[in-house]
Amino acid sequence: MFIGNMVTEAIPPRVFALYRIVETKKSIRRSELQAMMEPPELREDNTSAYFSIVLKAAIELKLVDNKDNVILLHNPDDQIRTMDEFRRYVISIMPSFESEQFWRCSNVIVNMNEKIFEYSSISDSDMLGYLSNRLGQQISASMIRGWRFWAQFLGFGYMNNFAFLPNAYLYVKNVLLLSNLERGKEYGVEEFMTCFSRYGKIILPLSVGDRNLNISMSSALRELHDNGEIVLKTGSDREANWTLFPSKDFFNQPISSIVFKGVQL
Amino acid sequence: MNREIAKRRYMDVFRPDVMHSSHGDFLATHVPMKKLYVTQQLTDHAEVPEQEKKNPKTEEEVYERFMGEMEEDQFVLVIGDSGAGKSHLIRWIDTVHKMRKSEKEVVLPIRRADNTLKGTIRQLIDLPEVKSLPNKELYKKLLSAATSVPEKELKETIYYQFIIQITNDDGKAGDEESVRRINNVDRKHLIALLQNSLFKDRLMESDGPIDRIYGKFAENKSNEVNDTVAEFKDEDFEIDSEFRNKLLLGADDKARKIADKLIDNNEFVCAVKEYINRFVEKVIQRCAGLEPGDLANVIEEIRRELFRQGKTLTILMEDITSASGVDDSLLDALLTDKIEYPEKQMCRINAIVGATDGYYREKFKTNTKGRIHNFVYVPDDLFGGNKKGLLEFFARYLNTISLDPKDIQQWVDQGKGEMETYPVHVVTIGDGWGEYKLGDKHINLFPFTQNSIMFLYDKQDIAKRNPRSLMRDIIETYVKESIEQLEDFPVHRPTFYPSNPELQNAIYNNINYDDSTKLRLACFMYVWGDGTLQTYEKKGVRYVAGLPENVYKELGLPVIDGNKVVVPTEEPSVPESTGSSSPEGARVPAREKENEQVMIALQEVDKWIDNKDYKLSIGATTKSVKALNNARKNINTFLFNSIDWQSEGVSNNAVQKVKNQDKFLVAFDRQTQKSDSVITLPASIESRGIIEAFVRWSEVGKESWNFNNSTDYLLRVQKWGDSIKPTLVKAILHYDDKKSDYFSFAVAAEFYRLILNGYCKNYQDPHNLSPELLLRKNQAVSGENGHTKSWNDLLRIVNGSDGAEARTCVLQYYNLVQGDVVHSINYEFDALAFNKAVKGVIKTGLHYETVDLQLDDPVKKRRLYSEYLKKIIDRLDIVVNDEKAMLALQLANIEKSVSLDDLESTTDIEDLIDEIGKFYSQAQKSHISIAIHYDLSKINYCKRNVEQIVKAINVAKQVAQTRDTIESLLLLSRDPLVCLKPFVELLNLAAADLEKTNSEVEMRMKTYKTENPDLGDTPYSRQQQIIENCAKTIEEVREHHVVG
Amino acid sequence: MLLDDLSKSIKAMKLLDTRETDRLTAEKRAKNDADFASLVDEFGNSVSVLKEAITMLDYRVSLETVQTMEDCSELLRGVIDDGVAESSKLYDIRQHISKKMLPNLSKEWKSFHQGITGGPLAKLHTLGRLVTDEKGVTEVRERIAAGDNWNNLSMLNENGDSRLIMLKNGLDEIIHMEEGLNLNDNVRAFIDSVTKRNAKVSDITEDIVNWIKKEGLEDRFIVAFRV
């Protein structure tokens, strides 16, 4: 999922459920773990087991390790209790996948901006063609279907059926939490972005010099701003500005600084 | 505005077509018409050829062309849409002509008046020229035709005239040359249908065809201009099944047959309608007691009389439909050329006649059309490209309502209606709203501003930009509001698309105003003002959005703080004549044509927000709520789709339960349809934004966010969605502050199913059941068992669809599926959660009482599990008791033959069965009749099951001691009866057969006791003797008597 | 208690069986015994007919036939030794009697019959022309013919005579007839020749002529050419 090709089967709740079992049992034989998730008697003969795919994703995410078919926690000291913690954990290790398909694909999609609205479905063949072209590798419908689960879970945007509706409010909120920002402090936009990009690079512009924020990021900042979780500020210094995606109804001035008020979860 | 005068006057001015309209008002409101088309020929579609459209004429030019001195007869048809201004033009010609005509010219104006035939005839008989007609008979006829008849009576007469006409027809409707329009059978059926009282009531309803015909013929009951055509429409004969069913109750067969034929048969409906419409003219004539030629005769008589007097005749008829019923012959008379009938000695005639283009197209006969060579076309958009004209039109009307009629009369009488003497009203309200400069006079535009006039004109449907509609829809509407409800002005709020949302945001985000004020203010500032947040001070007066402070105060609206700008250098002035430029080009920056559905929906929403009593007819199919219905549906779909339920810890199964019952997560406040939604969208600006976003998504984006500025709408929706998400997530599994526990009920029911199917034989205590039990194939067990009927009845229930449903729920609830699939055969369990939840159920020991269930769960698909579990627990006691009774009976039966103490071990039973086997086997050997009962398979079955039989007996003993229903059930699920029953049967049979055998054996033994077995000692002595003798003889023969 | 009752009942049925089996055997034996008796009677009959034929006609049989009869008696004796007339054995005996013994006896008797009746019949033929009692001649012929079948020999006529006796009587009658004609040896030789159709004129001796005259048999002779 996160290393190599994206898959549909390793959806976030499955990976988390697997982790939770291992976390509870401390160590468990692979076959026993599989039997818990895929009760053998219920399996139709012709259904393929997803277990190994889910397990692979959990290993990629450094949640668990497989030692001679015994599954152990990768880091026995850390405990992830909730889906929210799980999300934040995954976001925290997202940077390590920067060269991988999932990371790159996400980055391309969030930067499609309004072009994304032209596709009623992310698995639309034109969309797949576009992505394949941009990524320089074939992106199939099943890959992108798998992508959507994580995109939605991690909070790049919303899914309405197969339409992706960018707004990384959830993702950005988690990045802000991970970034240990100081409450009430006003950050210059450059400083803020530098700090943000440590975990949030995946939703920032494709190229480093680009200071135009995409819809996903813009909507996230506007929502945070409107919720009072941050305050966007504009100043006279043109050089140090980041530009939001144009809006008529919402904050639409170049951002020169951001006050971190503290995010609510 | 002079409020005091206007209050009294405005209705009189706005209803100009009634009998007593004022000549003065007419002149005072008249705006010179500058866009008239003159042509000698219309196209086939009754339109002006493009060529002529390039060359519009003014009213003066038209006058000159057709009203000058002439020798020849002339007929001019003034044509145009309803309300375009035909009458106005003809009336203006009349007014001007009266002043300019020569002495010998006699003018007969036939006003539209109330637009009925009777009204027209009344006008005729009042004319001195007609009164003095030498033909007194004809005059009398007219007099009687004009007589009023009570409405009801006349309508009845009209109705029955139709029946009489159709009855006497042959299906050709008087047109002998044509084919039958309707066959005789259908015609007779139609008569039957018309005679049916239900159907009659329908046709006689107000606004029904008879009412329409009556309205054109006798009396225009409304003050409105009656442009409707006196005829039947398709809908009059469109019968739906509901009406048909009503009809079935009383109608005779013929009526029913045609009613059936009319259902969903447009072609036939149309044929019937067209057929019956052929009689309208004749029916009206009959009811008026007129003959087709009567009006023509009147015209002819007048012409001959005037000829004698050496005069000429001008007829100005505003609307030909006011002669409905005799219009055809009247036209014929007006078109009669004196040259063709020199012997009749008729004067010259100049007829100027008005007709809507629709009427011309459809009602004028082809040969009549061919005789008309002069057309004046009054276009719909009289003010298209003429902003000045439009503003003048508004200004004159607004001025007229504020003027005392005396002042106007004085102007007409003394000032000769000249521009220089045109009176201007004294403003008592509306200072600062803007003025229109008419010559050197300034006319106050209250309750309009130039902006609002242009905006409202632009919003007006193109087909309704004619003077009458503008007056009625716009001027009258807002004048009325300004007089009656100034504090709520503007009550009618056009939708506007804020090209610059800055102002709207400033208004909508202001926490000091309530929603109603926000809406009113925004509308006012965008439509009446200039739609900007700009403010400036001029001469000590603060202007916001181009309007002075006092205007807002007059309306009780707050004055918003704006961005200060410099005073505009010039006051906006109206260009003299913009010529080609469109009025909307004047102020409003180019804006997209607003989507109609968005407009309709927002209008409805604004009413809803604004009016605390207004209900949204959600669920209805009317046009106004169609988009809202869709929006609500789409909002729900969006919320269901966009929330990542599994990540929120909600099983997809639980979501589907709610979703599948078409539950709406969101409903509108004050919607007519009942709703158990989670969120009620309040009537607020925020809701408006959400609704608007979804209407745009569906109507503009065609179900996508691919439309202009969609990201803002989307963000609004996302923000809102995020804000209500926790509520929704909680609500999905809750009702009445209770958590819906349907999974537990499904699990309990599934455990019962497993028990009943015998999958839990090894358990004695329900508290020991394990979650793993549920995760096996656990197919329904069918086939023979030893259970009682009530057990098997319950087994059938649990193995039925309810059971399957519960099992699906058990297996799918914690199955982590991909996307929103309802259930998947690919299992990927949230094993920890599953085990925890199931253990919770096990902990109850499956002891559920009715009160523990959630039979009041409003979500049907969840309630089903409670209902299903109730079905099971309601039967448990019966099932267990029946089984217990049956077991006790078996034990009693055993005891009849064998003491239970003798059956403690397998060998005990084995010996007994063996002995029974031997018994039957011997009986068979001995040909005892009961040998037919010898059933080796049964004996072998019992023999094979000796162990089970022992257990069964023990279970039976144990069950007898068990009080707890569920423990009993578990014990009973081992099905002790299945082997016990055959065993007991075998025992009973053997016992019975034993007796029979004994008596049979006894009987047969008796016969042996009477029989004397004759068994001699030497049975063959005689034969031995013979043989010995023979042997001797043979020996002798051998010795002595052998040949050779 | 059921167990005990069952075993009691089983015992009762077994006793019944024994009884019923017994009865069944007796019936069958009676029938077999009857069959046996009839076979023995049949055999005895044959032997007594043979004995009579021997006595009356000095009849002789072949050794082979004797053997078959001895075999038969041996078989019958076997049954008696068995003490039981077994159906299969009875069958064998019946087969032996009907397929071997009786056919042999019949065959041999037939030829014997021809042998003993040829001469007397020829004589009867000749004598018949001499005697006036033609009806008596026919009767004699019939009696002799009736005894040609062994199997019928013991059949009795209306007078209670067996066919064997009738045969014997017939033959005796012919002798009696001859004696009644007072024939001397010459005459007898002559009559033989005439009967054989080879009497020559030279054979008509005086004795002969005298005898003819004496007996008044002139009309009974003619002279014929040798054919």
Image (spheres, coloured by chain):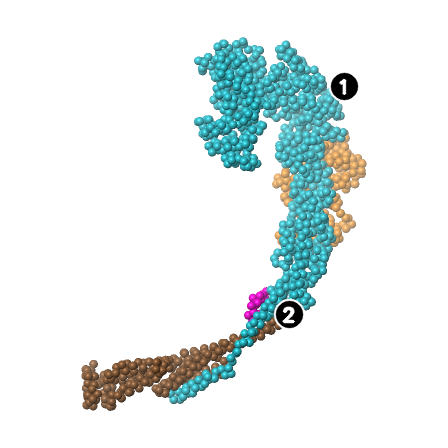
Chain colours: A orange, B cyan, C brown
Q: Nearer the viewer, residue A26 or B540?
A: B540
SS at mark 1 in the image: loop
Expressed as whole percent of the image width and height from the top left, the position of residue B79 reads 55, 21
Task: Assess disc 1: are there few (<14), some (14-19) or many (≥20) residues with their C-alpha within 10 Å of its C-alpha.
Answer: few
Q: Chain of mark 2?
A: C
Q: Nearer the viewer, mark 1 or mark 2?
A: 2
Expressed as whole percent of the image width and height from the top left, the position of residue B965 reads 70, 55
Q: Is residue B860 above or below residue B522?
A: below
Would you name the residue on which mark 1 appears?
A: B540
What amino acid type should be assigned to the residue bearing mark 2? Leu
Q: Are both tags, 1 and 2, on one chain?
A: no
SS at mark 2 in the image: helix
From which residue to which does the magenta span run? B923-937
Q: Is residue A134 left or right of residue C103?
A: right
Is residue B447 located in the magenta-colored stretch of the structure? no
Is residue B935 located in the magenta-colored stretch of the structure? yes
Q: What residue do we see at 69% from left, 34% from top?
A: B670
Q: Chain of mark 1?
A: B
